Amino acid sequence: RFYHGNKRREAYATILHSAHIYVCGAIAAAQSIRFSGSTRDLVILVDETISEHHKSGLEAAGWQIRTIQRIRNPKAEQDAYNEWNYSKFRLWQLTDYDKIIFIDADLLILRNIDFLFEMPEITAIGNNATLFNSGVMVIEPSNCTFQLLMDHINDIESYNGGDQGYLNEIFTWWHRMPKHMNFLKHFWSGDPDEKELKTRLFAADPPVLYVLHYLGLKPWLCFRDYDCNWNNDILHEFASDVAHERWWKVHDLMPENLQKFCLLRSKQKASLEWDRRQAEKANYANGHWKRNITDPRLKTCFEAFCFWESMLWHWGETNWTDNATATATPAIPTASLSSL
């Protein structure tokens, strides 16, 4: 590619705020961009809730850290999932770049998408005939656009309560790109043909999809043995072992110093086992709850409290010592996470 005059500045960007649980996802996303052959800048916006330790992992993965102040959604309930998601508007303040490809932190780049930098603002996939999905977007940073977004923050009613609905109200004229550029991990109930097609797409090697977007419970928050969305009835529409395995292949290509940011906390281990037991009680036909867990993270602990099995008793599960899937043995303590 050749530039005439001043070289255009282009970058991939994502954002993390209010939680550390997406740090592993952002690290894997960055690595997948590099594995695709892209050398564009990687910029991540983080707020004060992201620790210095987690920032060090993000930087090691290739992200350039930009610290921001969160923007509250004035129509959200306190402590709700969407309370701070208007922080995404800060992307338009990255005016040292001409073009940004925004990506959510829960996706993988399977094929190089640098060609999207040729597209105008807003370029995205359609959720339906009129609305776009904000998980992957081409944007053009501008302080004027940022101010426009802020000026109407108290007036506009988002159709989904979040930034996606708000942005659709602002950018009523947008440019549609193929769904392969942001392919959602989701199956419509009762459509076996669709399920078969999507499963083939998830497994294709070399990949057919450009971007695979992980909806539902995230791969790094499940045991690697199978997609834990199978253990919750309302999440079956997001369950795919093939897509799950694809994410873990990227994880396994990452350096060990980055994989350590994907360890499971004790509470998450207990939560996974709780869901597995509920699936067993419901006797879900998919049978994933029968599988033996071999994920080494099960017995790796970096916290002061490692006896996650005892949490099940406090949550009301009295039969917590006879589980053949995850035996109630002490976890193997490792170095504290802050030293990893």
Image: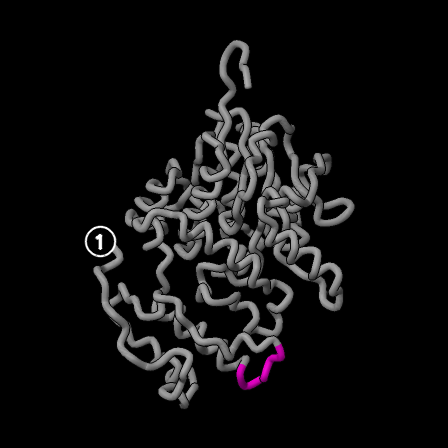
Q: Nearer the viewer, residue 320 or 127?
A: 320
Given residues 294 and 118, the one toward you in this image is 294
Of residue 78 and residue 139, the one placed in the foreground of this image is 139
Q: Is residue 336 left or right of residue 44?
A: left
Q: Is residue 291 visible?
A: yes
Picture mark count: 1
Density class for disc 1 (Cα within 10 Å; few <14, some 14-19, many ≥20) is few
In the rendered image, the vertical position of residue 87 relative to residue 318, given as above or below:
above
Q: Was residue 222 drawn as part of the magenta stretch in this picture?
A: no
Query: Where, by quadrant of the figure, is residue 167 drawn?
Result: top right
Which residue corresponds to mark 1? 339
- Relative to residue 101, is residue 156 depicted above or below? below
Magenta region: which residues? 280-285
User: Residue placed at 28% from the left, 73% from the top?
Assistant: 331
Residue 284: say if magenta.
Answer: yes
Say what secondary structure mark 1 lies in.
helix
Residue 131 placed where, x, y %? 72, 46
